[in-house]
């Protein structure tokens, strides 16, 4: 199967599909973190290249409800509308099987509700990270290894966050927080 992993610089999902024998390429504006087939550029350049399946991870910066306090500003300057249009482009791509992955976001209210909501703890990682999947031509993922939900950290403001998410400020904190858990990548590659 020819598989495109859109908006992925880490190589995690790409490499999981390659391990299952699929002809797979990742694509992102950033270079790949791991050596492997990767197109560095605009995903629109390669969407029509006869893919069988696409797993897309559009940037959540202007979409995730965790950043709702900035929505008025992002709506006023058009960033949120542009982000939603990008998601629509991915969902409407000429590819028979598509998964668009994002955290809880305005995609649910502005485009449509997700077909499935998953957690890392359903796939062998003691962590919570609510992840929505919008599916086209694909079945929902079946949990592979249900474990505990992991430790939580209470911030000074009283907010409860997963321990893995509570990272000190750093230049790559956003990359760590946005990465796909390996167990989820493996489930996608073996089940789809």
Image (spheres, rainbow, N blue to C red):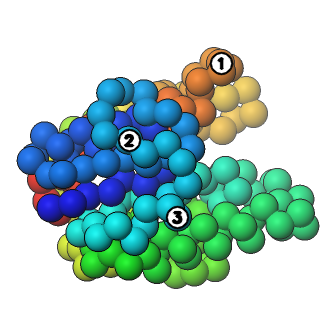
**Which element carries disc 3, helix, strand or loop?**
helix
Up the image or down, 18 lies above or below 135; here it is above
Rate crowding at label 2 as few (under 14), some (14 to 19) or many (20 or more) other CA atoms within 10 Å: many
Q: Position of residue 47 (x, y in %)?
A: 42, 67
Q: Nearer the viewer, mark 1 or mark 3?
A: 3
- Give the left or right position of residue 132, taking residue 174 as reference: left
Q: In the rendered image, is residue 131 in sight? A: no
Q: Position of residue 131 (x, y in %)?
A: 43, 55
**Between marks 2 and 3, how big is the CA–CA gap?**
14 Å
Q: Report which residue position mark 1 lands on.
A: 170
* Name of the residue lying farthest toward the left: 21
Report which quarter residue 179 is drawn in: top left
Q: Which of the marked residues, 2 or 3, is nearer the chain's N terminus? A: 2
Q: Report which residue position mark 3 lands on.
A: 44
**Which element carries disc 2, helix, strand or loop?**
strand
Q: Report which residue position mark 2 lands on.
A: 38
Write the residue at 15% across / 61% down. Answer: 1
Write the residue at 50% across / 61% down. Answer: 45
């Amino acid at each position: 199967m020819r598989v495109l992993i859109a908006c992925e610089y880490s190589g995690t999902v790409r490499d999981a599909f390659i391990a299952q024998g699929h002809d797979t390429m990742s694509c992102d504006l950033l270079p790949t973190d791991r050596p492997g087939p990767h197109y560095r550029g605009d995903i629109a350049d390669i969407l029509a290249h006869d893919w069988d399946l696409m797993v897309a991870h559009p940037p959540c910066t202007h979409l995730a409800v965790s950043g709702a306090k900035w929505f008025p500003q992002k709506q006023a300057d058009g960033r949120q509308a542009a982000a939603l249009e990008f998601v629509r482009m991915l969902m409407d791509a000429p590819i028979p099987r598509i998964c668009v992955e994002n955290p809880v976001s305005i995609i649910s209210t502005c485009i449509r509700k997700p077909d499935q909501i998953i957690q890392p703890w359903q796939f062998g990682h003691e962590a919570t990270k609510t992840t929505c999947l919008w599916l086209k031509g694909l079945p929902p993922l079946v949990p592979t290894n249900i474990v505990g939900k992991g430790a939580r950290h209470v911030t000074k403001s009283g907010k409860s966050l997963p321990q893995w998410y509570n990272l000190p400020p750093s230049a790559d904190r956003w990359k760590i927080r946005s990465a796909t858990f390996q167990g989820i990548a493996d489930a996608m590659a073996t089940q789809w």
